[in-house]
Image (cartoon, grey):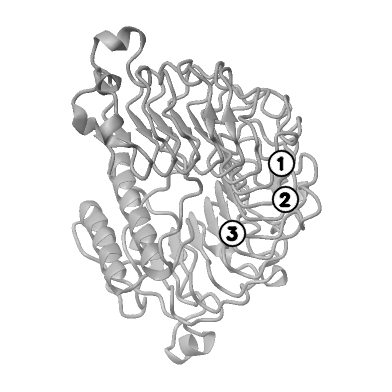
């Protein structure tokens, strides 16, 4: 997720969330907004140098359930704002939904937004959220209460962070600096010693390397849409508790190599790694075994060598779509240790055959947009757990009899935009929907849907899409549809 600035309606929504949380906790509404104030202004107002001291964290009164509910509301508001500002971000893959959504660490919800501390009647200890996005500032504003937990500074012109400034924010858990003008030198030393920071968003800046002073407490780091070309183990050794790392839309690999071997090995708790749209030519080696979701879409990957995981991996979701993989580049040992893999996206590569030696644990397999011309009878014989299979937009003209019958729990099959002249025969008995639009199908054999025990009982099929084919309705064999739940299940037009 890339966080954008909040528009007027979303600011109102956010304010409602914060105030409702504060009402539960203190029984009153608080509205405080931080503004940039210089030291000179403070002196002119007669404020003492210690007018804004370090505050101790406030004792929490809200229940865990209340915090989680407000946190989810805030997250949804930020996501809606992203869509309103930049257009909805496309999904990382076109795979059918899987039970595993992208992992994101939970964070405690926050109570109120900020305002001028000189005019607020609220005690500084009550401030939780500071909203300073879209203010046009070029540095972190003065006046942000030191006990703020959630600080939004996206969509500004911030080009430097005052040294040691962030160390004063002992309660800060979430800092958003997305879409600013930060460079490597501008943030050097800025995050060192920040005691409670869990989520740091630095996407859409001008960074060329990963910061080397990341706080030990960090659980989520977003560095998407920068100019990153290098990284080292030293950077990650400082934050071994990192759970989510997003590095999409950078220049990692430089089009000629992959990442250094085991460069991410210090991140032994990492759950989600996003390397979409970089310039990697091979899958990185020595990745943490803890990773459950790995996104490598839109790189230049030609090879998936053995050694990506040196041991049994916990990987569940793997997206390798929009790369340059061939059957030669996908080796027998490539996924040997991915024994928990459930979702594999190979859409938009250069495969000419269904890959062999795929993990038996697969539930979703996307092979759309490749160069596959035929399906052999044993192509899927080992994938007994497969539920969703995408083969659209290939060059398939021939499917061996019973090629899909070995998939006992397959629910969804997509063969659209191929060159089939006949319906595949002996489709799986557990199939719910099959899409065959935009082929050259002229006939439907009797054993396409109804074969074996199904010929004597009703099929589980609820949708058969045959639009945009060459079928002559006058020559259809009615017996081919005898086991379907009515002729309305089949769509010819």
The answer to whether mark 1 and mark 2 are in CB contact below 8 A is yes
Residue visible at 45% across and 36% down in the picture: 415
**Which quarter of the figure is the C terminus placed in?**
top left
SS of the residue at dot 3? loop
Q: Distance between the residues labelled 2 and 3?
A: 15 Å
SS of the residue at dot 2? loop
Q: How many numbered discs, if any?
A: 3
Among the 4 quarters of the image, the one containing residue 80: bottom left
Q: Position of residue 186 (x, y in %)?
A: 68, 72
User: Which residue is at the front of the view, 446 or 179?
Assistant: 446
Query: Vertically, is 199 above or below 43?
Result: above
SS of the residue at dot 1? loop
- Dot 3 corresponds to which residue? 224
Disc assigned to residue 280: 2
Residue at the outermost bottom position: 44
Crowd band around label 1 with a 10 angstrom C-alpha radius: few (<14), some (14–19), many (20+): many
């Amino acid at each position: 997720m890339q966080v954008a600035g909040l528009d007027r309606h979303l600011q109102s929504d956010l304010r409602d969330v914060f105030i409702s949380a504060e009402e539960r906790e203190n029984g009153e509404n608080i509205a405080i907004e931080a503004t940039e104030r210089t030291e000179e202004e403070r002196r002119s107002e007669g404020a003492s140098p210690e007018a804004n001291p370090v505050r101790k964290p406030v004792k929490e009164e809200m229940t865990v359930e209340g915090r989680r509910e407000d946190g989810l509301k805030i997250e949804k508001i930020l996501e809606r704002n992203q869509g309103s500002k930049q257009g909805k971000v496309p999904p990382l893959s076109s795979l059918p939904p899987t039970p595993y959504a992208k992992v994101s660490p939970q964070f405690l919800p926050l109570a109120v937004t900020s305002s001028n501390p000189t005019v607020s009647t609220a005690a500084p200890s009550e401030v939780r959220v500071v909203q300073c996005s879209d203010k046009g500032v070029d540095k972190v504003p003065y006046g942000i209460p030191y006990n703020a937990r959630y600080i939004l500074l996206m969509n500004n012109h911030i080009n430097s962070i005052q040294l040691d400034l962030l160390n004063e924010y002992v309660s800060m858990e979430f800092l958003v600096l997305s879409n600013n003008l930060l460079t490597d030198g501008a943030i050097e030393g800025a995050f060192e010693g920040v005691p409670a920071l869990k989520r740091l968003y630095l996407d859409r800046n001008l960074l060329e390397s990963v910061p080397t002073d990341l706080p030990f407490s960090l659980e989520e780091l977003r560095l998407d849409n920068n100019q990153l070309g290098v990284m080292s183990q030293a950077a990650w050794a400082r934050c071994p508790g990192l759970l989510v790392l997003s590095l999409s839309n950078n220049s990692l690999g430089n089009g000629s190599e992959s990442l250094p071997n085991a460069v991410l090995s210090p991140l032994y708790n990492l759950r989600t790694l996003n390397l979409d749209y970089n310039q990697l030519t091979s899958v990185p080696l020595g990745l943490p075994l803890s990773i459950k979701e790995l996104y490598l879409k839109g790189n230049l990957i030609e090879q998936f060598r053995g050694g990506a995981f040196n041991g049994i991996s916990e990987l569940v979701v793997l997206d390798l779509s929009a790369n340059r993989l061939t059957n030669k580049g996908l080796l027998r040992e490539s996924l040997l240790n991915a024994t928990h893999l459930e979702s594999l996206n190979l859409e938009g590569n250069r495969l000419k055959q269904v890959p062999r030696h795929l993990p038996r644990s697969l539930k979703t397999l996307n092979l759309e947009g490749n160069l596959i011309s035929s399906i052999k009878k044993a192509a899927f014989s080992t994938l007994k757990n497969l539920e969703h299979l995408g083969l659209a937009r290939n060059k398939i003209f021939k499917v061996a009899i019973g090629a899909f019958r070995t998939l006992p729990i397959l629910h969804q099959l997509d063969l659209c935009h191929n060159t089939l002249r006949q319906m595949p025969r002996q489709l799986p008995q557990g199939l719910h929907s099959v899409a065959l639009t935009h082929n050259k199908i002229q006939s439907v054999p009797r054993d396409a849907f109804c074969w074996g025990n199904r010929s004597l009982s009703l099929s589980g099929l609820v949708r058969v899409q045959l639009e945009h084919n060459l079928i002559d309705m006058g020559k259809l064999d009615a017996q081919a549809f005898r086991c379907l739940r009515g002729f309305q299940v089949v769509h010819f037009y």
